[in-house]
């Protein structure tokens, strides 16, 4: 590790098997990743503070133009409340969004001293499918995300709190959830990130995974 990473008391590179957890949420025009449009995508980054607690540090949020020929299901648009043609969306082409986003993730992986990123999401394989499809359409060869492994907060919160719906899991974790803000990629990503941090921190506090002892403490 670099001197900068050596100076961190709780380096994230030592926690998740060398993977960097990156929380992702996509809002889409349907359920089929290869045919349905990505309309919004957001990524939240997490890191450990000086007390060894996992915290949300930054969120990137993009409005996305449907790729040429993309399917848009009316029921999906009604569910998310997204109007793809709204003049205020300030959407970018999908290929530009994925170029910028995955470049940012690669830099975060490098800065953290990790080997690659692992997608964290609520029902994470849904989001991973759209990320992989978007990267493939953009001919992005250096996708930093693991191609099949994920961390799913729906499963984790079902174990920790007996809830699998994001809003109910957040409420059970003591995180205030605003249903009027839901189905915005940025909001859902940040709430998923806070839920993930809460579960990781509670598990550690309850005597689960512990940071390795310093040599002087052994």
Image: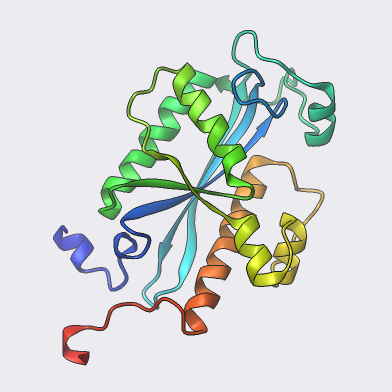
Residue at 49% across, 29% down: 132
Figure check: 17 above or below 132: below
Relative depth, front residue between 60 and 119: 119
Q: Residue at the bottom extreme?
A: 217
Asked whether residue 173 appears in the rendered view, the answer is no
Quadrant hosting residue 153 = bottom right
Quadrant hosting residue 104 = top left
Figure check: 22 above or below 55: above
Residue at 30% across, 64% down: 14
Asked whether residue 184 appears in the rendered view, the answer is yes
Residue at 38% across, 79% down: 210
Colouring used for the render: rainbow
Relative depth, front residue between 27 and 147: 147
Figure check: 199 above or below 190: below
Q: Residue at the top extreme?
A: 69
Residue at 53% across, 21% down: 94
Q: Position of residue 203 (x, y in %)?
A: 52, 76
Q: Position of residue 39 (x, y in %)?
A: 65, 27
Q: In which quadrant will I find the C terminus?
A: bottom left
Q: In which quadrant will I find the N terminus?
A: bottom left
Q: Position of residue 116 (x, y in %)?
A: 33, 45
Viewed as shown, does residue 16 lie left or right of 174?
left
Relative depth, front residue between 174 and 169: 169
């Amino acid at each position: 590790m670099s001197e900068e990473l050596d100076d961190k008391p709780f380096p994230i590179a030592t926690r998740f098997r060398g993977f960097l957890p990156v929380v992702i949420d996509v809002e889409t025009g349907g359920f089929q990743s290869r045919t349905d449009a990505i309309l919004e995508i957001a990524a939240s980054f997490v890191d450990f503070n000086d007390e060894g607690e996992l915290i949300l540090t930054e969120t990137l949020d993009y409005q996305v133009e449907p790729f040429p020929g993309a399917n848009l299901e009316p029921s999906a648009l009604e569910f998310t409340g997204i109007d793809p043609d709204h003049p205020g969306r300030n959407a970018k082409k999908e290929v530009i969004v994925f170029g910028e986003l995955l470049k940012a993730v690669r830099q975060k992986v490098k800065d953290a001293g990790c080997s690659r990123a692992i997608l964290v999401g609520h029902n994470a394989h849904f989001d991973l499918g759209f990320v992989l499809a978007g990267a493939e359409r953009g001919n992005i060869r250096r996708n930093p995300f693991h191609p099949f492994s994920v961390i799913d907060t729906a499963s984790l919160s079902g174990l920790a709190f007996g809830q699998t719906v994001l809003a109910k899991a957040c409420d059970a974790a003591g995180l205030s959830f605003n249903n009027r803000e839901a189905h915005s990629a940025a909001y859902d990503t940040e709430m998923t990130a806070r839920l993930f941090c809460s579960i990781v921190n509670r598990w550690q506090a309850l005597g689960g995974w512990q940071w390795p002892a310093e040599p002087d403490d052994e």
